[in-house]
Image: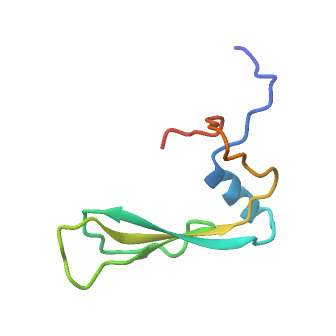
Amino acid sequence: METITQPLGRGAFSWENWKAELTGEALKGTYEYPLFTDTRITGEMSSGLGPYQLFNAVPTVQTDLLLPYIVLRMEYYASGDEEDWSRTNVERYHGG
């Protein structure tokens, strides 16, 4: 069996952020992202997901429109180099 001698690259940002929370990094900010779907969502997960929470945003009137039925709240702990958004970089792409 071959031994890997090169260090592994950085993981997906979501994983790096979760690890930063576990190691006690300081909270740098909180962000919320609406997630759109045409499926009715009937629950929420506000604990057990590390620095992430999913909130139910089901509207009072059911429609066939694509609406933000879930809100993802992310507490930002990760530190290090800022990403360079001026060009495409797929180094941390995870396929999800």
Outermost bottom residue: 60
Q: Nearer the viewer, residue 87 or 62?
A: 87
- Image x and y of residue 87, in percent: 65, 39
Q: Nearer the viewer, residue 14 or 38?
A: 38
Is residue 46 toward the left or the right of residue 21 in the image? left
Say above or below: 30 vs 89.
Answer: below
Is residue 55 toward the left or the right of residue 80 in the image? left
Kindly indicate the quadrant of the structure image that contains residue 48. Answer: bottom right
Kindly indicate the quadrant of the structure image that contains residue 26. Answer: bottom right
- Image x and y of residue 44, in percent: 41, 74
- Image x and y of residue 36, in percent: 35, 63
Say above or below: 17 vs 85.
Answer: below
Say above or below: 11 vs 39.
Answer: above
Color encoding of the figure: rainbow
Q: Nearer the viewer, residue 90 or 1?
A: 90
Query: Residue at coordinates 66% horizontally, 35% vertically from top-left?
Result: 91
Quarter of the image containing the N terminus?
Answer: top right
- Image x and y of residue 81, in percent: 81, 50
Query: Residue at coordinates 20% horizontally, 83% vertically from top-left?
Result: 61
What count of labels does the image hold?
Answer: 0
Outermost top residue: 1
Is residue 49 toward the left or the right of residue 40 in the image? right
Is residue 11 toward the left or the right of residue 94 in the image? right
Query: Residue at coordinates 63% horizontally, 68% vertically from top-left?
Result: 51
